[in-house]
Amino acid sequence: MATPDPTLFDEIATCRLCADRFAATATRHSPRPVVWFRESPRILIAGQAPGLRVHETGKPFWDRSGDRLRDWLGVTETQFYDRDTISIVPMAFCFPGYNASGSDLPPPKICGATWHTRVMQSLGDVPLTLLIGGYAHRWHLGPQSTVTQTVAEWRNHAPRVFPLPHPSWRNTGWLKKNPWFEAELLPALRARVKEVLP
């Protein structure tokens, strides 16, 4: 059962805990929390952190990674962005920025430590949770060895939880090396999505 927290959404949306941290990155950007959840969703997507395009648009997974993720789930954009059924809660609500070499910085730990437990309590009992990437795997499942092993052991957590790799196009090589993901996991995931969505 969800625990109502009427101030939580606005508190996160106006959070500036990482303002100095982001100002010191190569991107020198300001915080822009992307908050996309409501109580009692049918599906929770627990991800890593917004990328630059999501930071600019304020819409989660509004990029090529999102296209791939929607394909993995077998849902339309309309279904995906229906906040009454799908909540998207990354380990950091803001774009962490790039380092001097142009690589993504990790999600600041202070974000998850500050907000994640309260958000999970506000969501309540979610029928299907998707854990995207190592940061989400570790927070929700505890210490893990590698993303590949965690995803390979997906049957240990299904049908309520599916650990996934990040849908970034940088992971195309990973998908080719692990054909069982598309052959075995994705059909089970799509079937579960159909079961839980109205």
Image (cartoon, helix red, strand yellow):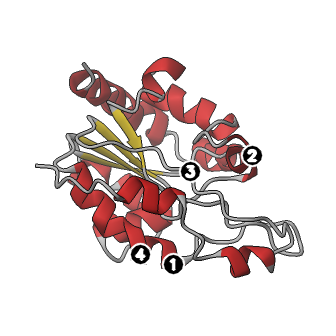
Q: Residues within 10 Å of mark 4 (few under 14, many from 20)?
A: few
Inspect the image, locate mark 2, and give the three-letter code of the amino acid beneath it.
Answer: Glu
CA–CA distance in space, label 4 to label 1: 9 Å
List x then y, in percent, for residue 74: 44, 22
Q: How many marks?
A: 4
Of tags 2 and 1, the one toward the viewer is 2
First along the sequence among labels 4 and 1 = 1
Helix, strand or loop under label 2: helix
63 and 15: which is toward the camera? 15
Measured from the top left, where is residue 11 in percent x and y? 44, 62
Q: Earlier in the sequence, mark 4 or mark 3?
A: 3
Q: Is residue 167 above or below residue 81?
A: below
Q: CA distance from mark 3 to mark 2?
A: 10 Å
Q: 7 left or right of 29?
A: left
Looking at the rendered image, the quarter that the C terminus falls into is top left
Query: Would you say 190 lies left or right of 26 here?
Result: left
Quickly name the residue at label 2. Answer: 56
In this figure, which residue is indicated by the disc labeled 3? 34
Which numbered disc covers residue 109? 1
- The mark found on residue 61 in the picture is none
Q: Earlier in the sequence, mark 2 or mark 1?
A: 2
Q: Is residue 192 above or below residue 135?
A: above
Question: Which comes sooner in the sequence, label 4 or label 2?
Answer: 2
Residue plotted at (22% across, 40% down):
40
Q: Position of residue 8 (x, y in %)?
A: 36, 59
What amino acid type should be assigned to the residue bearing mark 3?
A: Val
The CA distance from mark 3 to mark 1 is: 16 Å
Tell me whether the residue at label 4 lies in contact with that at label 2, contact meaning CB atoms closer than 8 angstroms. no
Q: Is residue 180 visible?
A: yes
Label 1 sits on what residue type? Lys
Residue at position x 44%, y 71% in the image: 112
Q: Which mark is residue 114?
A: 4
